[in-house]
Image (cartoon, helix red, strand yellow):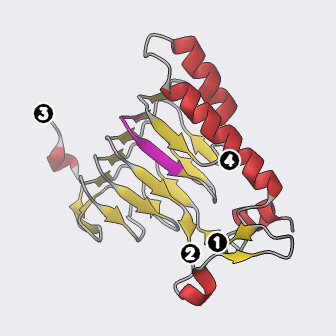
Amino acid sequence: MNQKELMLAGKIYDPNDPELLELRAKAHRLSAEYNATFETEEEKRQSIMKELIGNLGEGVYLQGPFQFDYGCFTSIGERTYANFNLTVLDTCPVTIGKDVFMGPNVSLLTPLHPLRWQDRNTYYREDGVLTDKEYGKPITIGDNTWIAGNVTICGGVTIGEGSVIGAGSVVTRDIPPNSLAAGNPCRVIREITDADRVD
């Protein structure tokens, strides 16, 4: 397996692999270009998102500014919306369903680092390049979910369809479908039922 394949499989990989450096540089450039646009430049914004994001559904609206690490390893379903300051570190696949709402300052963080400093610290490869050992776990956000402001979702988490994640939560474990969950660490408070109808 090459370094990209190792990364996407959640295995230890070298983040300073030339192919990965090139992919990140492209994503960072496209993120900066998008962030420099105005909301009225709809065609330009759509063009940038289509080049950046691996699988982009119709009607997706990302307010910006945003930051993607790779972009090409992210999938976003139809009619999904994200407010200011979305951060997506997609060293492993990030799958965002359709009709998902995300508040400001949402972070989707797939990368992980070894717990022991002896394994985590940077080191020099044989070719003299400074690097480290990283790995990651994918994130999946189901259809029709609402991720409130200032939420951090960690690698390895699946959020079930129809769930609501309260503001400021740090999600470190799976959330079942149709759940209201909040806190640090995020925990299920209760099921969302017909009793929660607006009318």
From this view, report whether residue 64 is shown above or below residue 120: above
- Helix, strand or loop at label 1? It is loop
Q: Are marks 3 and 2 in contact (CB under 8 Å)?
A: no
- Helix, strand or loop at label 3? It is loop
| Marks 1/2: CA–CA distance | 5 Å
Q: Is residue 56 visible?
A: no
> What residue is shown with label 2?
113
| Marks 4/1: CA–CA distance | 15 Å
**Mark 2 vs mark 4: which is more N-terminal?**
4
Amino acid type at image mark 3: Asp
**Residue at 65 percent of width and 28 percent of height:** 50
Amino acid type at image mark 2: His
**Residue at 38 percent of width and 64 percent of height:** 176
> What residue is shown with label 3?
199
Amino acid type at image mark 4: Arg
Q: Is residue 19 left or right of residue 11?
A: right
> What residue is shown with label 4?
24
Q: Give yes or no for residue 85 being in the magenta stretch.
A: yes
**Mark 3 vs mark 2: which is more N-terminal?**
2
**Mark 1 vs mark 2: which is more N-terminal?**
2
The magenta span reads 82-88
